Amino acid sequence: MTVRVLIVFVIAVFSVLSAQTLAADRDARFFDTELTKSLGLDEVTAARVSAILAEKSKAERAVIDRLRAGAARNKGVVADSTRAELQRIEANAATKLSSVLSPEQMRKYRRMRGGAS
């Protein structure tokens, strides 16, 4: 693999990870206003969902920070385990949200996030 190809690959990986970080940040801000109103959540449920999204954001940031710190050392190679870890974080958050929200609220939440959970 040439250095140029490697650089392009690293930029692509960080673009994806940055998009995930932005999505997590957007979730945290978005939740406090629109999501609460749109889903008709009471204060207790809103607090629980907010905590789940904050936990998800923190876990995603930890993975991304580890990846960034190791990028130079690993020459930009992203292990499948890193991608799998991010997918597990997403799935775990969706499972927790499903235990707090009704099926209809989960559908609305997914639509509001553009189809992602």
Image (cartoon, grey):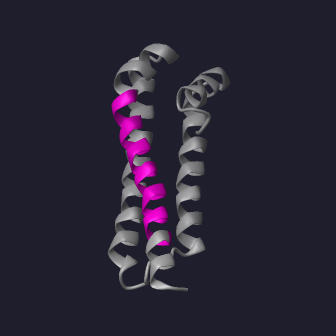
Q: Position of residue 69 (x, y in %)?
A: 32, 74
In front of the other: 111 or 37: 111
Quadrant assignment for the C terminus: top right
Q: Position of residue 8 (x, y in %)?
A: 47, 70
Q: Residue at x 55, y 75 (%)?
A: 79
Q: Position of residue 116 (x, y in %)?
A: 59, 39
> What main secondary structure does the magenta stretch of the protein show?
helix
Q: Is residue 95 above or below residue 10?
A: above
Q: Residue at x 41, y 25 (%)?
A: 46
Q: Position of residue 108 (x, y in %)?
A: 59, 22
Q: Which residues are magenta?
A: 9-30
Q: Is residue 10 above or below residue 61?
A: below
In front of the other: 37 or 74: 74
Q: Is residue 63 above or below residue 46?
A: below
Query: Residue 83's image quarter?
Result: bottom right
In front of the other: 30 or 55: 30
Q: Residue at x 43, y 83 (%)?
A: 75
Q: Residue furthest right?
A: 103
Question: Can residue 18 be found in the magenta stretch?
Answer: yes
